[in-house]
Image: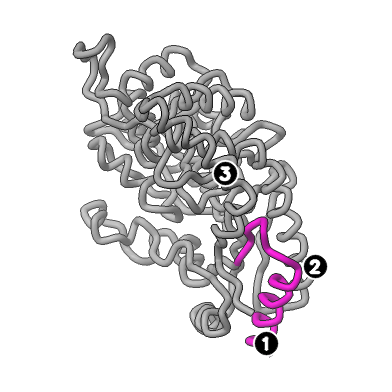
């Protein structure tokens, strides 16, 4: 039995009729850019997350860039973030001319360590950018307390965490600006690229809306240099069909995770994900720490089991950031995690027999 890391065929099959219907509505109007579907979906997200303003854009990466620009972060500024994340987190900081300052992560959740944030603050620090990795929100109470004490902005990279909670608060709504990604592999994914900024600040929301259309308001009059970054009406229509199912899908992911916890807890060579008591994860990934990780990965793939390494090289060691003088040994928890993590299938459509096959192959490897 083959078990893919993600099965988009199984995911879309039950809802394709609804999606075709809303796509036909977009095609009938030809309002492909910021059409009524975008405004409607933004309102749906505002209601779902309990946030005052949701601003759709072209990608999760652009959402981060827009957030930085809205907060007027740029040349000679520093933004503290994690090196154990997808490249877009730090790439967005570099794109606006600022400097990413990497600090280490917590060994159990893989999220940024608030104690390390406090140590890294300088006179040039303007913001903190935590990442809610794998669907678990970072320790936002501690992060916000540090930010308040030092008068810093907080941008939540919530690309992997829509619907995840921390102390009953929705991830992405706790800092100054939160960002979402609707990349197809996300828990709420579209049929292409898409992203969103979230904020409860009306002034920031107005600025974000202008920045996504080249900084113009009214048309052809530009207060700022913005981006051409708009959520397509087609993608908004698809996402509006999918959003009502999100809670059900996230609950199925949690049930799948619980199945793994029950049946893999007796494998001493692996450590299962740790979810803090204050948090409610949506399990964008189910990431284990594994002995002989690379050999296990190859064994799973050879057995038809999808798996992946998120992420094989921390950002402070990436060639493009060599000018920041990061070197091996600087951030040991991130570096060790990169050598030992492995993500296995967790998508909501997994059957018990598929989960049993994943468990069987892992146990077979270590036995």
Residue bearing mark 1? 364
Mark 1 lies on a secondary structure that is helix
Residue 65 position in % (x across, y down): 33, 35
Q: Nearer the viewer, residue 27 or 220?
A: 27
The residue drawn where x is 26% and y is 54% is: 321
Task: Report the disc number at residue 262.
Answer: 2
If you read the primary sequence from the N terminus, does the residue marked by circle 1 or circle 3 appear first? 3
The residue drawn where x is 45% and y is 42% is: 119
Mark 2 lies on a secondary structure that is helix
Residue bearing mark 3? 161
Counting other residues with Cα less than 10 Å from the Cα at mark 2, is it few (<14), some (14-19), or many (20 or more)?
few
> Could one spot residue 249 in this view of the protein?
yes
The residue drawn where x is 39% and y is 49% is: 102
Residue 175 position in % (x across, y down): 52, 29
Counting other residues with Cα less than 10 Å from the Cα at mark 3, is it few (<14), some (14-19), or many (20 or more)?
many
Contact (Cβ within 8 Å) of mark 1 with mark 2: no
The residue drawn where x is 76% and y is 56% is: 255
Quadrant in which residue 273 is drawn: bottom right
Residue 188 position in % (x across, y down): 56, 44
The answer to whether 351 appears left or right of 321 in the picture is right
Q: Is 304 covered by the magenta stretch?
A: no
């Amino acid at each position: 039995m083959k078990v893919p890391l993600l099965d988009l065929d199984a995911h879309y099959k039950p809802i394709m009729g609804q999606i075709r219907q809303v796509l036909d509505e977009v095609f009938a109007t030809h309002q492909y850019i910021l059409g009524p579907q975008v405004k409607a979906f933004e309102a749906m997200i505002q209601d779902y997350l309990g946030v005052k303003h949701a601003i759709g854009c072209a990608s999760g990466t652009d959402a981060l860039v827009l957030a930085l620009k809205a907060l007027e972060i740029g040349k000679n500024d520093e933004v503290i973030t994690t090196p154990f994340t997808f490249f877009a987190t730090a790439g967005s900081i570099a794109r606006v001319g600022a400097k990413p300052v990497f600090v280490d992560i917590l060994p159990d959740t893989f999220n940024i360590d608030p104690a390390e944030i406090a140590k890294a603050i300088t006179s040039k620090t303007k913001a903190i950018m935590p990442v809610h990795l794998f669907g678990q929100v970072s320790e936002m109470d501690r992060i916000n307390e540090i930010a308040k004490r030092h008068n810093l902005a907080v941008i939540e990279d919530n690309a992997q965490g829509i619907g995840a909670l921390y102390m009953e608060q929705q991830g992405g709504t706790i800092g100054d600006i939160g960002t979402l990604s609707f990349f197809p592999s996300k828990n709420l994914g579209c049929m292409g690229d898409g992203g969103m900024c979230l904020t409860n600040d009306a002034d920031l929301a107005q600025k974000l809306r202008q920045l996504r259309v080249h900084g113009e308001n009214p048309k052809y009059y530009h207060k700022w240099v913005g981006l051409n970054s708009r959520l397509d009406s087609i993608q908004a229509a698809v996402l509006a069909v999918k959003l009502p199912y999100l809670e059900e899908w996230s609950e199925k992911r949690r049930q799948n995770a619980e199945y793994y916890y029950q049946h893999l807890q007796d494998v001493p060579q692996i450590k299962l994900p740790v979810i803090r008591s204050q948090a409610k994860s949506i399990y964008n990934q189910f990431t284990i720490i594994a002995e002989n990780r690379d050999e296990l990965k190859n064994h799973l793939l050879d057995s038809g089991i999808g798996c992946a390494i998120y992420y094989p090289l921390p950002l402070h060691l990436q060639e493009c950031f060599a000018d920041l003088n990061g070197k091996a040994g600087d951030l040991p928890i991130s570096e060790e995690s990169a050598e030992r993590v492995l993500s296995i299938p967790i998508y909501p459509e997994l059957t018990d027999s598929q989960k049993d096959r994943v468990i069987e192959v892992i146990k077979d490897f270590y036995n």
